[in-house]
Amino acid sequence: MTVDAHHHVWDLSVRDQDWIDQDSPLRRDFAVEELASEARAVGVERTVLVQTVTVAEETPEFLALAEAHDLIAGVVGWTDLTRPDVADELARLRELPGGRFLKGIRHQVQGEPDPRWLLRADVLRGLAAVADAGLVYDLVVLPHQLPACAAAAASLPGLTFVLDHLGKPPVASGVLRPWASDVRALAALPNTVCKLSGMVTEAGPGPWSADGLRPYADVVLQAFGPDRLMFGSDWPVCTPAASYAQVLDVARRLTGPRGHEQIFETTAVRVYGL
């Protein structure tokens, strides 16, 4: 069995995705049914649906989708970590239809101007509530924010931090430093995990190759090891650069035979409690 630990869906008639350019091929609806067709064609049987916008209504919608579709085994939602009653809000989400599928929380840290946003006192308090709720925290960050990720993970050893998209390294430019050393510092903390996801998008907008992605995949393979690495398609964000099948294929080629069961199944099952 293969698990896709990172994908999205959206319906533009319900809510605009204001991060999508007007002329982008992503500016259309992407539904679970479309994903299911592509995923099951290549042997993906379970997925984790991840938030896209910082809107409170999205998480209940995603939980209801998980309840209705057996492909979705977990949801990483959003809530305002800085609200004083964040613990109560997490409990409320779990009481909603599909609430048992809530596995983690994510915030668009990449859009925060403060590179140390994760270390604010109110954010750390919210992250502690995520840990107390038995959830994990997904990190969607840019490379310059990685040191703050490591500091936050060190201060909250009881919370598992999942790094999305390798921390968005500059794949298109081929530059490894300082991203590689900062990722290794994060991986040195035992409560951190990484998603092998998002690489084809970071390699764009031009053509990409497995050889161009390999140095970045090798860094996280060596730093985290297969038991703390999980595959994510980042569908449909990946689609301007590669099809679902191509993203899965290149991930398999980049990892080789080492740790396939962990990377493509058991790490996600364990970390998210699928």
Image (tube, rainbow, N blue to C red):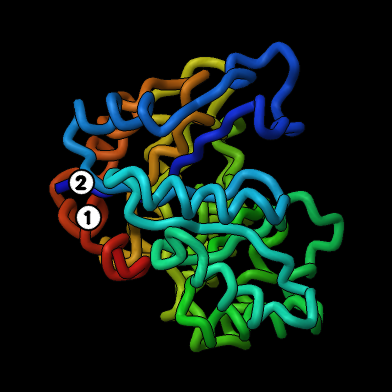
**Contact check, label 2 and label 1, Cβ < 8 Å:** yes
Task: Name the quadrant containing residue 71.
Answer: top left
Pick the quarter of the image with the C terminus: bottom left
Q: Is residue 185 left or right of residue 258?
A: right
Above-or-below relation of 214 to 172? below
Q: Is residue 257 left or right of residue 113?
A: left
* Residue at x 70%, y 61% (from the top left corner): 145
Spatial CA span between label 2 and label 1: 5 Å
Element assignment for label 2: strand
Q: What amino acid type is highlighted by mark number 1?
A: Glu
Element assignment for label 1: helix
Q: Residues within 10 Å of mark 1 (few under 14, many from 20)?
A: many
Above-or-below relation of 228 to 196? below
Query: Which comes sooner in the sequence, label 2 or label 1?
Result: 2
**Residue that numbered label 1 is attached to:** 265
**Residue that numbered label 2 is attached to:** 2
* Residue at x 62%, y 83% (from the top left corner): 129
Image location (x, y in percent) of residue 128: 62, 85
Above-or-below relation of 24 to 234? above
* Residue at x 24%, y 50% (from the top left corner): 264
Between residues 87 and 199, which one lies in front from this camera angle? 87
Q: Residues within 10 Å of mark 2 (few under 14, many from 20)?
A: many
Image location (x, y in percent) of residue 230: 33, 55
